[in-house]
Each structure stands twice: as C-alpha cells, then as structure tokens.
Image: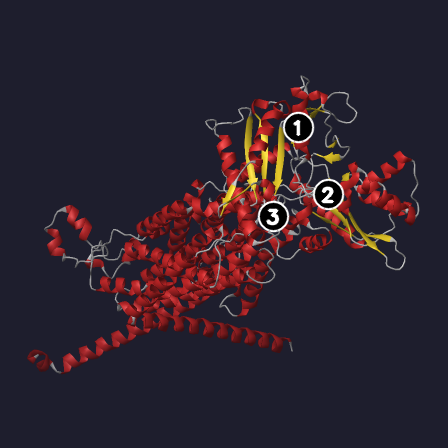
Amino acid sequence: MCFIGGDGASASWILWRMLRQVIHRGLKASFYWLGLFVSRHPVFFLTVPAVLTIIFGSTVLSRFKPETDLEVLVAPTHSLAKIERSLANSLFPIDQSKHKLYSDLHTPGRYGRLILLAKSGGNILEVADQVLQVHKQVLDLRVNYKGFNYTFAHLCVLSHRDKRCLLDDIITIFEDIRQAVLSNSTFHKVPVSYPNTTLKDGRVSFIGHQLGGVSFSPNSRDQQVKFARAVQITYYLRNHGPVVQDAIAERWENEFCALVSRLSTTEAPHTPDQLHIQSLTSFSLWRDFHQTGVLAKGEVLVSLVLVLLAATISSSMRDCLRGKPFLGLLGVLTICIANVTAAGIFFISDGKFNSTLLGIPFFAMGHGTKGVFELLAGWRRTRENLPFKERVADAFADVMVCYTMTSSLYIITFGMGASPFTNIESVKIFCQSMCVAILVNYFYVFSFYGSCLVFAGQLEQNRYHSVFCCKIPSVEYLDRQPTWFKTMMSDGHDLSTHHDSVPYQNHFIQHFLREHYTEWITNTYVKPFVVILYLIYASFSFMGCLQISDGSNIVNLLASNSPSVSYALTQQKYFSNYSPVIGFYIYEPIEYWNSTVQEHLKTLSHGFNKISWMDNFFHYLRVVNVSASTKGDFITILKGSFLRSPEYQHFTEDIIFSKNRETDEYDIIASRMYLVARTTEKKREEVVELLEKLRPLMLINSIKFIAFNPTFVFMDRYSSSVISPILTSGFSVLTILILTFFLVINPLGNFWLILTVTSVELGVLGLMTLWNVGMDSISILCLIYTLNFAMDHCAPHLYTFVLATEHTRTQCIKLALEEHGAAILQNTSCFMIGIMPLVFVPSNLTYTLFKCSLLTAGCTVLHCFVILPVFLTFFPPSKKRHKKKKRAKRKEREREREREREREREREEIECIEVRDNPDHVTNV
C-alpha cells in the first residue's frame, strides 16, 4: 500500500507539472501570436495610442482642478472624532465656541492668526505698544467687495452677551500694560499669571496658548510672569451665512497675509522695529500643500530629460546596426504619453489634483521602462537569421508572460489600496490613479513600443544604420574610408565569424556582467563577505522597524520653506507647553449636586488644567457661604445668582437648560468644560496618547461624555488608517503568490520571490525610519510600490534561475544575470537618475518621496546583484536532476555519434567494393 500511495503521489505531481507546463506554454504561445499580430499591423498599433494621447491629453488642461479641502485628503475618512464633532456641534455650535477650542493648525472656519516675536531675545511685554499697533492695523483692514468696504468688525464672531467681536484676552492684558506704561509705571505693576490669569472684570482666563516662552518671577505664589518671548493672537471670522460672506472673509484673509508681508519688510511705514511677525490663515495649509506641485514642475521636466538621456545611452552599442539608442528613447516616451493618457482619464472622471499624485509619473516610469528594457533584451536574445516579425513575436513570448504577471500584481496591490479598507482619501485616490496608469502603460508597451520595435527590426534586417537610418556600406567600401568614418558606420562584427559568436553580447552592460561580474560574485572568497553584508543589512532593518514613528503631522506634506512650516516650528518652540483645548461635553442629564458625581468628575479631569463652570460655581458657593446639596437649591443659585454675576456671565454658553412643563423646574440636559494637558515639544505624540486614553473612558464611563478638539479629526486612528493599505496590499500579494504555487512551473520560484520581496520591504521600512521618515500617506504609498518594484525586478531573475537546466547552481545564476541583469541595471539606473532632481524641490513631501524611492531601488539592486546570486548557490532548488538528465543526454548523444560512425564505415566499405567490381565505370566518370 505504501508503494501504491507513493506511486499515486508521484503521478499526481507529474499531472500537476504537466498542467503547469501546458499553462506556461499556452501563455507563451498567446503572446507569440500577439507579437506576430503587432508586427503585421505596426501602423495601427502606433496610431491608436497616439490618437488616444491627443484626445485624453487635451482634457488635462481643460479639466484641471486642485483639491481644496485638506481634511478630505489627509484625515481618516471614517473616525469616531467626526461623529463626536457632529454631536458636539449639535449641542454647542463649534463656530460660536471655536475661540475656546484652541487648535494649533486645524482651527475650523475662517480665521487669521499672528505670532509676534520680540527680536534679539527681548521681552514681548516690554513692547506692548508695538503689539497693539499691529493689532490696530489688523482691525482697520478694509476689504472692498462690489463697492462696499468691510472690516474685521463686519466679519468677526460676535459674543452672545454684548454682540461685540470676540478677541483674545491677551489683548486686554496688553492694553492694561500700555496704560501702566503711559502712567509712568512699569509693566510689572500689571499682575499677569500663567497659564490662568485674572482679568480686570474678575474673569479667570486661560492664556497658555496666547503667551509663549514664559519665565516666572522668583518666589511668586501664583506664577507671576516676569518674561515672555512671544504672543499669539487669533482673529476669528464667522463661518456660517451666505456664500457672499465667505467670499468676503476669503478676501479679508488674503489682505491679512498681505499686511503681515508688508509689516515683515523693514522698508514699510509703521513697521514695528522690535517685532518679528508670522501669520497663519485657514487656507495657509492648503496653499503650502499645493505649492509642492507648483515648485516641482521644473524638476519633473529635468528628471524626464535625464531619464531620456540615460535610456538612450544605456541602449547604445558600438555596433551601429544592432545598437538601439532610439528604442531606449522611444521606450521612455511611450511611458510618458501613457501617463498623459492616464492623467486625462483621471480628470475626465472628475478627479482633482493634489500634491501626493506627484509620485505617479515616477512610479509608472519605474514599471513601464522595466517592460521596455526587458523587451529590448528579449529582442537581443532572438536569432538574427529569423525574419524581423518572428523575432518580435519571439521577444513577446519570452518577456510578456512575466511582465503581465508583474503588471497584474501592481493592479492587485494598488487596487487593494483603492478599496474601502483604505481610510485615507489621498492614498485611495493615488492607488486608483496608479491602477489606471499601470493598465494604460501595459497597453502602450505592447502596442506603441511593440510597433517601434517592429520598425527598428525592419531597419536592422535591411542593414540600415540605427542612428542615421542610412544603408550601411560594404566592407570593401569601409576599408577605403578614414578611421572615424569606419567607426561610425561599421556594424562592429566580423562577417567571417558571423555564425561563431553572438553579436549582441558586445553590449557594454552584458559584456561587463558576463566577463567580469558573474565570475566575481560567484567566487568562493566573496561569498562570506556577502553573508556578513546581509547580516548587517538585516540588523539595521530590524533596528529601524522597532523605531517606526507616526507621521500624522501635516507639516510633513508641506513645502519646506513655506510660511506654514515656519509658523508651525515657531509655535512648537514657544507654545508647546499645553495641549490643544479639549472640549469635555456631558451630553446626558446627571446629578451635578450629588457629591459622588462631583468626585467622579474630578477624577476624570484629574491632571488637567480646567476651565470649568463647575469649579467656579463651587468657589462662588464657598465665597457666599451657601450650600447647594439639593437639585432645587443647585439650579436656583446657579441660574438666579451665579450666571448673573458679571465675572461669570460667560459660562451661560456652557450650560443647556430645559424647562419641565409639568413642574416648571429647570433641568441641566447638557454642559461642557474645557481641559488642557501639560505637554512638551513632542506635543502631537502626547496628544495622540491622551486621545487613546480618553477614548475607552468615553465608551464605558457611567457619565456619558465626549472629548473633542478639531485636531482630533486628523489624529484619530491615523496610525491604523495609514498602515492598513500596506497590510492589505502585502496580504493580497502573499495570498496570490501562495495560491499560484501550483500554477507556475516550479513552486520554488514563488517561495524565493516571497522571501526576497519580504526582505526588501522590511529593509526599506527599517532604513527609511532610520532616515527620519515617518509613517505618513507618502511613505505608505512608497512601501506599496516597493512590493511591486521588488517583484518586478526579482521575478524574471528568480524564475530564470529555477527553470535553468545547467549543471550547477553557479552556472544557473550566471545565466540569470546575463539574461536579465542588463535590463535590471538599465531600469534601476534610469529610475534613480530620474528621482535625483526631487532633492532640489524645497518640500517635505518630495524629500520623503526621494528617500523612499532611493531606498527601494537600492535594496532591490542589492538583492538582485549581491544577495540572491550568493544565497541561491547555497539553497534549493537543486540542479542534480538536471545534471543527471544532461549526463544521460550526453551518453545518448555519444551512442548516437558511435552509431553514425559505424554507418559511415559501412558506407565507405560498400563504396570500395563497388569501385573494385566496376573500375571502368570509375574511369568513365
């Protein structure tokens, strides 16, 4: 039974192997006929892509629109923070309370914000007069709209109590300081505490985000401010109303930026000479995000020129007949017009441009030119004595199977990135556009570039010059010409030895790989050093993977020299002592008068700096020596006495009362207070950690509350949202490679491909972390591309090795390097040369794109040319069975030659007998 089971397993394996060979040969035959069809109709396949490019390319200019909503692009699409924002807005309109919900860079609605910094390390409190001069100029700004002038007073957010513009309380403090100075006193006479200070009207105000770089007077009990380096003032504009009001507010913001620009120049009149001024508005982040695309225009064109030159030079040979410089040039142009067509399709489908899409031309070029160079290498491997149409068909059959597989994996991985599992809209848009670009590239490579290959093959067959397209003279004519003429017009191949060597092996990359590199890398003495190199590579990669950082800071996507980045850096330096103001919303009725509930609220808010009506109310009860332990007393004193006091009237906006119609009693159905956490310069990471601690409490606590700040919309679940695309893409690739184990001729090819791609991916992830690149949307897109780039270059290399039938692994790896090494080097060199100009674009987004792309290309080349050639000589697949087959075939050939010699001797004996029997016949002949 064991023998029967073994025979059954063997038969099943043979059947699977036959099935895999049938599929492989069927695919090769299909692409052979496709190549033959293209070679018979080259004009059609050249014309159709050109016409499509003209049609879709014209729509790029007419339908180009930038995406203006930055929250839609970079904030997680589905998050609890957006639900909490809706609930908070339904209770207490955020537009009316945004002056209390301070947020660093993500303040909702229209606004203008200033940071005034004392020059030369001075004290901002000593230049209060100049601060107020700048403030007055902002208030006096006039915006003309349809013949009417509008100032800040017409657009500002109004107070509910007195219908006056809501201004930061720091303005009141600076006015008091100026009055003290005018009355021949010093600013020290005005008591300023930090972070909570008491104003003249008795109100306690939080100024932790309005005064920065603070130092305190020694031995002061309530932290009296002695020195302050900077002040931050925000001017809030109304967010609701007709479209006209929003248009006027937008103009006011533009005038606000222009005013700050004028005040920053020393030549302007009324310029404060002791202040350095920076500004931020609601459109600043979008403007500086979009600025990356504008700044990169010139560098993208330079990159295209460099790639064209690199492709042309790398495709050239000294042989003027077989060199194909124009095919390298046309290959890059093929990918360019394919990208233009893909861009037209994107804009026709109502797509809007954003700066993250800047990476698509580079990523598409990296894949498309790989197919171009592989086709060119496949052409070189064909037999010269075949007609050019059959040579094109052979090149298609040799190359397009693997190129189709890698293109399919591109579409699958980026398709998973465009799926509903992706929670970042910019990543989803990029992946959708990348799928379209890969499809169009694939079609253009076998159609447009295939037609170019047909025409080049026809010129070669008719012995035309590959550059000048003129007939190559005969050898006799060239012998009579000068040396320079012979060098330019010679085909570089000795016709007397035409059948004894392969002319295409004279290509300088292939010659270097065959004669020098393959012998060196497979040398026994080199292998230990390669193993040590890989251990170092793996160690650094692992170390980097342990230090992955969150890249949710939107500054990482902005132009590096932009005003927003400068503002954010100044803000981080001087105003990072406290977190954004967190709104603590209690959205269900609770027994506020109950001491247990009060203790519970104190526990929840422990460790925070509170701006709370409850704390002030209990302080008020202690001052007036009144008890409020019952509901009736609590509501009566709160509504009838506390909220009517001038210093506490502003808390009216923080409580929602409801009157019971049956009992005429008032109930508190919702309320809010504000919490501020103490932070350091790593404020963003600490706020994310704070949110993760508050979120479980919101769900399980007996007091139903939500905690919200506009910044949370950009932070909530950002890490999991930004990582999910690479996880889904990687899982899909792993699944497909495992499922196709039984569809490829040798499953070890898939196994080695999985190991290699994993090694490259982890290497890029770890090294980019060590290179100070965080996990943001750009780096995640680069990691998805790394999966595909590694497969694109390693798959042909590995499959050639596992399918080779040479005697030893070393000979097989040499064969793989000789067949695919030139295409890999050509493509990676063009890719790296193409991304070099991105270094000169002053943008954090392009820096991230450059670093990740460079690491991707570098790690892939390292594996293809150093690690795999050594490791594949140690591990399976074994080539012993091929050796046995070769030995059996050699013995069979020797027996065949022996039989041939026997037949030849018999034939000679018969001829000798015939001559002896009929000598007259021989004489006659």
Q: Amino acid at mark 2?
A: Arg
Mark drawn on residue 589: none
Horizontal side, residue 622 vs residue 608: left or right: right
Q: Amino acid at mark 3?
A: Gly
Q: Earlier in the sequence, mark 3 or mark 1?
A: 3
Classed neighbour count for the residue bearing mark 1: other residues with Cα under 10 Å, few (<14), some (14–19), many (≥20): some
The residue lying at 50 percent from left, 31 percent from top is 264
Evaluate if marks 3 and 1 touch, with contact meaning CB atoms under 8 Å apart: no
Using the rendered image of the protein, determine whether residue 614 is visible from the camera's viewpoint.
Answer: no
Mark 1, residue position: 175
Under tag 1, what secondary structure? helix
| 309, 262: nearer the viewer | 262
| 174, 433: nearer the viewer | 174
The residue lying at 78 percent from left, 37 percent from top is 646
Which quadrant of the figure has residue 63?
A: bottom left
Residue farthest along the top direction in this orientation: 184
Name above or below for residue 261 compared with residue 13: above
Label 3, label 1: how far apart the Cα atoms are: 28 Å
Classed neighbour count for the residue bearing mark 3: other residues with Cα under 10 Å, few (<14), some (14–19), many (≥20): some
Q: Horizontal and vertical percent for residue 776?
A: 57, 48
Classed neighbour count for the residue bearing mark 2: other residues with Cα under 10 Å, few (<14), some (14–19), many (≥20): few
User: Of tags 3 and 2, which is closer to the observer?
Assistant: 2
Mark 2, residue position: 161
Q: Horizontal and vertical percent for residue 613?
A: 80, 42
Q: Earlier in the sequence, mark 3 or mark 2?
A: 3
Under tag 3, what secondary structure? loop
Label 3, label 2: how far apart the Cα atoms are: 22 Å
Label 2, label 1: how far apart the Cα atoms are: 22 Å
Q: Horizontal and vertical percent for residue 89?
A: 70, 53
| 283, 177: nearer the viewer | 177
What is the total number of numbered labels drawn onto the structure image? 3
Mark 3, residue position: 109
